[in-house]
Image: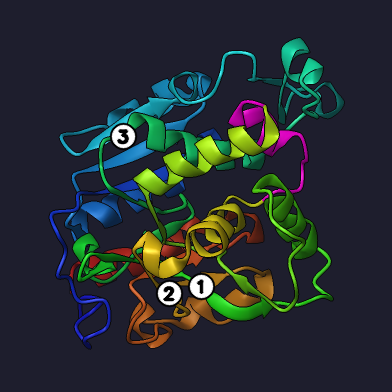
Amino acid sequence: MPWGADGAGESNQLNETFALATPSYRGDIERCRLLCASIDRFVTGHAVHYLLIEDRDVPLFRDLEGPRRRILPESQLLPGWLQSRPDPLSFGTRRLWTGFQALARGIPPLRGWHAQQLRKFAVAKTCAEDVILFADSDMLFVRPFDLTSLSDDGAIRLYRKPDAITADMARHIPWCNHASALLGLDAPSFPSPDYINNLVSWRRDHVLALLDHVESVSGRDWVSAIARERQFSEYVIYGYFVERVLGLEAAGHWPDARELCKVYWFSEDVAGMDRLASFEEVLEPWQVAIGIQSFIGEPLDRIRALFERQASA
């Protein structure tokens, strides 16, 4: 059943245009290939699917391009002074995003997950669509999903789980503090809403306004302002901006605490997956996708077999 068929999130959009965006890298290319196949099979309502890729990896992803899928190299998204290079401490198996100019700006060496977050902000400066839905490359769609169902009378869905970040969540607190300081806000109070999830949708015009706001508050370019602290979350930054700076209603967002993607974060979560006959056995009625973190070691062949069974049903 397509998401929104129960009445929540039904589309009455005012001519918004929609895009999907996926940051990925060579280590996830086969998972990204499966995501693309799932989008082609199950997803409608979007103008284009952007793949946000480090320049050196672009040739590996080129065959995924098509009429509605476009690769955006990192050089078209991030400034030239922030470039990836081999991490000498890992014998070149990992990458660092750094450089003399980046260090001069007070930016510590960044990892790939930092660069992927920055690409998500930057895609708003390149794309023309009104709404961007982010789909990570280690997830896949397993039910029909129309992106226009994110719109309800012109307001766009925003994942927001009330009071989900508490004062004892050591990993999340720096993200919230960073977002507040970045936006010129008072320190956050806890519990705080959580905006971090798979399949999060943003309004492009608000991302552009956010980046302008960050530059005005900080007196720095937005990349330097965000990345000078390594502990940041793109979803918390956007969530705080549209809720605490603009106001959700004024920003044209409607909050939804439901998770559209069922995510397996830990190896113990996938115990018994080899006995599944279909993803339908584990999905809630409103869920349209499955996310299985690549680092937990679930065989991709098993995931692909379940997808192919779902796609042919």
Identify whether 11 is placed above or below 45: below
> Of circles 2 and 3, which is in front?
2
Residue type for callout 3:
Cys
The stretch of residues the image draws in magenta is 220-232
Secondary structure under the numbered disc 2 in the rendered image: strand
Identify the residue under disc 1: 160
The alpha-carbon separation of the residues under discs 3 and 1 comes to 25 Å
Identify the residue under disc 2: 255
Q: Earlier in the sequence, mark 3 or mark 1?
A: 3
Determine whether label 2 and label 1 are within 8 Å by CB: yes
Identify the residue under disc 3: 127
Secondary structure under the numbered disc 3 in the rendered image: loop
Residue 167 painted magenta:
no
Determine whether label 3 and label 1 are within 8 Å by CB: no
Residue 123 found in image quarter: top left
Residue 18 seen from this side: yes
Q: Position of residue 159 (x, y in %)?
A: 46, 69
Q: Earlier in the sequence, mark 2 or mark 1?
A: 1
Category of crowding for the residue at label 3, using alpha-carbon neighbours closer than 10 angstroms: few (below 14), some (14–19), many (at least 20): some
Which sits in the foreground, 58 or 60?
A: 58
Category of crowding for the residue at label 1, using alpha-carbon neighbours closer than 10 angstroms: few (below 14), some (14–19), many (at least 20): many
The residue lying at 76 percent from left, 20 percent from top is 105
Q: Position of residue 158 (x, y in %)?
A: 42, 66
